Image: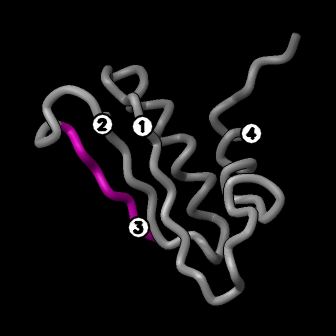
């Protein structure tokens, strides 16, 4: 079985046939990477975000965790 790498996930999330499916052409796309609760997960999320932001239609990636302390550890990465 193959593992899904952060790079492959980033490509999938940015793809018009994947995470951006259904977004109209002029749309500004924002991607949320949720359940990032440790430094290891944050490092992987940064790698995913780097790949997602290579897509010209993706404006930003938000990294954090929706559960727990909503004021702790949120990060927004822009193109």
- Per the rendering, the mark at residue 66 is 2
In the rendered structure, the answer to whether residue 13 lies left or right of residue 39 reads right
**Going from the N terminus, do you reach mark 1 or mark 3 first?**
1
**Going from the N terminus, do you reach mark 2 or mark 1 first?**
1
Helix, strand or loop for disc 1: loop
**Going from the N terminus, do you reach mark 1 or mark 4 first?**
4
**Going from the N terminus, do you reach mark 2 or mark 4 first?**
4
Q: Are marks 2 and 1 in contact (CB under 8 Å)?
A: yes
Q: Are marks 2 and 4 in contact (CB under 8 Å)?
A: no
- Per the rendering, the mark at residue 8 is 4
In the rendered structure, the answer to whether residue 48 lies left or right of residue 3 reads left
Q: Which residue is mark 3?
A: 78
**Quarter the N terminus occupies:** top right
The alpha-carbon separation of the residues under discs 2 and 1 comes to 7 Å
Residue stretch in magenta: 73-79
Q: Are marks 3 and 4 in contact (CB under 8 Å)?
A: no
- Per the rendering, the mark at residue 34 is 1
Helix, strand or loop for disc 4: helix
The alpha-carbon separation of the residues under discs 1 and 4 comes to 17 Å
Q: Are marks 1 and 4 in contact (CB under 8 Å)?
A: no
The alpha-carbon separation of the residues under discs 3 and 4 comes to 20 Å
- Per the rendering, the mark at residue 5 is none
Whether residue 4 is situated above or below residue 10 in the rendered picture: above
- Crowding near pointer 2: few (<14 within 10 Å), some, many (20+)? some
Helix, strand or loop for disc 3: strand
Magenta highlight on residue 57: no
Q: Position of residue 36 (x, y in %)?
A: 37, 30
Q: Tell us which disc is closer to us: 1 or 3.
A: 1
Quarter assignment of residue 72: top left
The alpha-carbon separation of the residues under discs 1 and 3 comes to 17 Å
Q: Tell us which disc is closer to us: 3 or 2.
A: 2
């Amino acid at each position: 079985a193959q593992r899904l790498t952060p790079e492959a996930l980033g490509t999938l999330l940015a793809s018009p046939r994947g995470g951006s499916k259904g977004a109209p052409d002029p749309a500004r796309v924002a991607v949320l990477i949720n359940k990032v609760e440790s430094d290891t997960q944050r490092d992987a999320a940064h790698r995913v975000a780097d790949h997602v932001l290579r897509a010209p239609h993706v404006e930003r990636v938000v990294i954090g965790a929706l559960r727990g302390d909503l004021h702790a550890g949120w990060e927004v990465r822009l193109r």
